[in-house]
Amino acid sequence: MKTKIFGLFFMLSVVGFSQMVFKPGVKASLQINSAILPDLERNRSLESVLNGDDVVKGVPQLADLKIGYRFGFTGEAKGENGFIALSTEYVSTQIYKESTYDGGLLGSYSLKTLDRKYTYLDVSTSFNLFIAREPQLYFGVGAGLDFLTSYSGDKKPESTNTVAFVNLGVKLDEKIALETKAVLSFNEVYKDSYIHHLMFPIGVTLYF
């Protein structure tokens, strides 16, 4: 179902591209990485979490913030009220969680409960509407497929992720745009782990 959603976005984009003027460009972003996690306080063993043991009955929490990056190519088909974008990007992300515990007389201590790094090839499409003309602000929604290219740790993540995102940007002129996104993976990073990527890239697009 999730892959079908991306397929629908992609098909609509291709139709839109055939009816508008194509404009290529390159993208580069710094990315704030986090994740939606199960209740790691119940079980401090990383292997237990990744193996789907009884750690998911508590309240979900967010992973700590880490910085990654993404870069790649984009193509836009611009119309009167907005544009359709197709992008291919190399994505570096990390899931990290450090918890603090009360050690009584020994004081508090911190324990790293999760630390994994990943890279993906992201293929995405988005529909964007202009919400202001001066400056040229736009808001968009999109979907994509992330293909795993590398990872750390012994446990292998899922090889693909379906993601959805919203974005907000401004076109400074015909050659440059600034944009920020909120990206969430539908798929669990590891099967039956209840862990989902959450990414916030902030970047620039340069048009040819």
Image: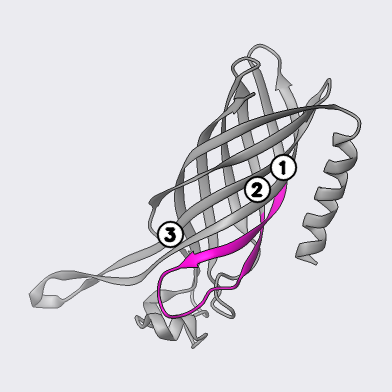
Position of 113 with respect to 167 (left or right) is left
Position of 104 with respect to 142 (left or right) is left
User: Quadrant of the rendered structure where residue 205 is?
Assistant: top right
- Span of residues in magenta: 142-163
* First in residue order: circle 3 vs circle 1: 3
Q: Compute the Cα span from label 2 to label 1.
A: 6 Å
- In which quadrant of the rendered image does the N terminus lie? bottom right
* First in residue order: circle 2 vs circle 1: 1
Nearest the viewer among 21 and 143 is 21
Residue assigned mark 2: 165
* Residue 122 location (% of width, % of height): 62, 53
The amino acid pointed to by label 3 is Gln
Residue assigned mark 1: 141
Secondary structure beneath disc 3? strand
Nearest the viewer among 180 and 131 is 180
Marks 2 & 1, CB-CB < 8 Å contact: yes
Nearest the viewer among 128 and 204 is 204
Name which residue lies at 37% across and 76% down: 41
Q: Compute the Cα span from label 3 to label 1.
A: 24 Å
Judged by its main secondary structure, the magenta piece is strand
The amino acid pointed to by label 1 is Val
Nearest the viewer among 98 and 115 is 115
- In which quadrant of the rendered image does the C terminus lie? top right
